[in-house]
Image (spheres, rainbow, N blue to C red):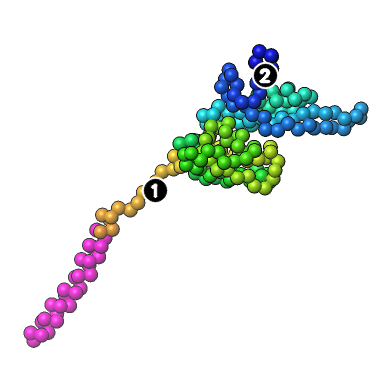
Amino acid sequence: MNPRGRSNRRGRDAKTDAIEKVIEIDRVSRTVKGGRRIRFRALVVVGDGHGKVGIGVGKANDISRAIAKATAYAHRREKPVTIINDTIPYEINSRFGSANVFLKPAPQGTSVIAGGTVRAVIEAAGIKNIVAKSLGSANKLNIAKATILALSKLDIINKQYAVEEPKPKPTKEVITTNKTTDNKMSSRPHSASSSSHDSFARN
């Protein structure tokens, strides 16, 4: 809370040092018997800047309550992200609905090359060098979910590679011993034929 009593919903929270960003606020109207009911829907992304990020959606009659609900939900649904040298380990493509997000690692000094929703999610996760592209739908909620899905896949794939064991390869000793036995077997009839040929020549 600042001296004027207003809560800091954007940027970093002073108490928890968490990154909170409001991506979108929509006004949702619903027609009922007595007229129209107007509510607000907020899309918020939160992260610690060190490999954890989450998104949340909240609905309420006023904007402040909608943002508070979305922020609380996003904190409960934070997911770990694999970060190596301030970037992701390899490129990945993810799809949610009609939104398609492509993420590619970048060297030091590249910074974040992304726009809008994807940039907000990446910066909250703590990734500093990356190239991202959003294709397909322009729905911000679907783009945010596709980005979260792509970042969470990185951790799952790394765990799968860590569990897999290499397959045993055949040793060269077994192959060489088989070759030597085959050579011995093939040399025996040849020696017999040569001795018989010498006996015929003497006669």
Q: Residues within 10 Å of mark 1 (few under 14, many from 20)?
A: few
For badge 2, the amino acid type reads Ser
Label 1 SS: loop
Residue 184: quadrant of the picture = bottom left
Residue at image x 92%, y 27%?
Answer: 34
- Whole-percent x and y of residue 118? 61, 38
What's drawn in magenta, residue-wise?
A: 177-203
Q: Residues within 10 Å of mark 2 (few under 14, many from 20)?
A: few
Mark 2 or mark 1, earlier in chain: 2
Residue bearing mark 2: 7
Query: In this orientation, which residue lies closer to the viewer: 124 or 188?
Result: 124
**Residue 187 on the magenta segment:** yes
Q: Can residue 138 be seen here?
A: yes
Q: Can residue 78 be seen here?
A: no
Residue at image x 78%, y 31%?
Answer: 27
**Residue 112 on the magenta segment:** no
Secondary structure mostly seen in the magenta stretch: helix
In the image, taking residue 158 as reference, residue 149 lies left or right, namely right
14 over 155 or under it: above or below: above
CB of mark 2 within 8 Å of CB of mark 1?
Answer: no
Query: In this orientation, which residue lies closer to the viewer: 193 or 32?
Result: 32
In the image, taking residue 97 as reference, residue 186 lies left or right, namely left
